[in-house]
Amino acid sequence: VVSRPSSCTCTLPARAGVHTYMTCSDSARPATVDCTRYIQHDSVVAHLCAGVVRIQSARCAELSEVAFLQSVIEHVGLTKDKRAEWLYGSAAQFMIKSTGSDKRYMRGGLWQEPLQLAPALAAIGALAAKEPIRSYVEVGVFSAWTCVLVSAYLRRFAVDDSIDATRAATFRAAAVDIDSTHIARETHTLMRELNVSFVPRKSLSAWLGGGTRRERRVGLCFIDGDHSYDGVRNDYEEMAPDCRSMLFHDIQDTTTLLIQRQGGGGGVPSFWRQLTRSIRPARLASFTSQHSTAAKQFGIGLVTHGKGGTAEPDDADAFDAWGRGLVAWTSFCALEPALCRETECRFSRRCHRAWIKSPNRGTFFTDNETWYSKGRPLTYGVAP
């Protein structure tokens, strides 16, 4: 697979796709997990376990290389999806295949784009170089494979030889979801070995513990739960004061935008656009490269801590001005009119037919300032 360069728009220290870490130690690597049980049971979790072992055994220099991380992700495997090449492009070859008696392939694989997750991990490692990330929370884990892989990676940077080489044992992570229906029994076993706990969404506050927010603050949070605008905004507003840095999934995802258009506020893409208008650029990074050429897929956004030491916005007024629901969709469309026209066009037979017949498909939505859906022109509001 030929990888296009990552479109990381960030100011994190980077040089030729390599980050230098101070908290990673080749001499204090954690004990590797035993994958024998998963191989003997012909479980797809053996793929995930092998990826964890590669991370646990890797030299620090390897962990700083985007190419190495991409290789690990591809060998772990991607979640099987009927959209295949449309979703993953040429990376569809890495989709998990059910083997032996294990037909629960939906309980395995990474629902990720390797060209996005790999540089995102490297950027997180750059943050850990300044301050070890000893706690991790992922909201919306599905099979929990991403949570396990990210946790294994973070544990490699939870050690500081100059202070205490045993600190990796203090690392803890929470895989948060409504229930654990899609998490295989073998994945639960692997989670326990990495000190990753499944936490029902309603019990997250209890897991975070008491004390002041500074005392219970989480090093890194990953939001990938409810993809509606209100859903992701609620998760952010609840967790940002408790999280030092945050990741967001599906910041450019076409399917999410289609499902969450209008009343859904535009979902995660709309929320990410809002958030980036209320946070200083130096705190932001986005990873949007992909193998698929069919449409924009997935996308990972990173917000690092601000002056208050949390992932909260710098400009609260700009953040609140966006509104919710249909108002959020209107605000988003005022900034991204061509994208909104393209999204709405998919639900209008008349527009879709005009797009198909157009000799200039690439600029159709940019050139046509007014077009009709069900006989009525779509109008967009003014950006806040």
Image (cartoon, rainbow, N blue to C red):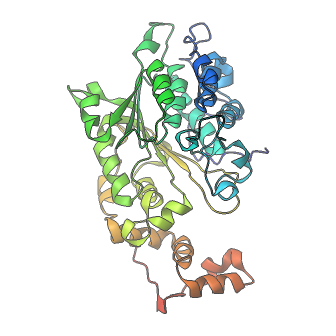
Residue 50 visible, this orientation: yes
46 to the left or right of 312: right
Residue 383 visible, this orientation: no
Which image quarter is the N terminus in?
A: top right
339 to the left or right of 181: right
Residue 321's place in the image compared with 262, above or below, is above
Residue 356's place in the image compared with 78, above or below, is below
* Residue under the image location 64 percent in, 27 percent down: 64
348 to the left or right of 321: right
329 to the left or right of 300: left
Location of residue 47 by image quarter: top right
Which residue is farthest front? 101
Q: Nearer the viewer, residue 245 or 375?
A: 375
Q: Nearer the viewer, residue 95 or 327?
A: 95
Which residue is farthest bottom? 375
Q: Nearer the viewer, residue 182 or 68?
A: 182
* Percent coordinates x, y for residue 185 in the rendering: 47, 30
Which residue is farthest left? 211
* Residue under the image location 60 percent in, 19 percent down: 35
Location of residue 173 by image quarter: top left
* Percent coordinates x, y for residue 239 in the rendering: 32, 41
Residue 273's place in the image compared with 178, above or below, is below
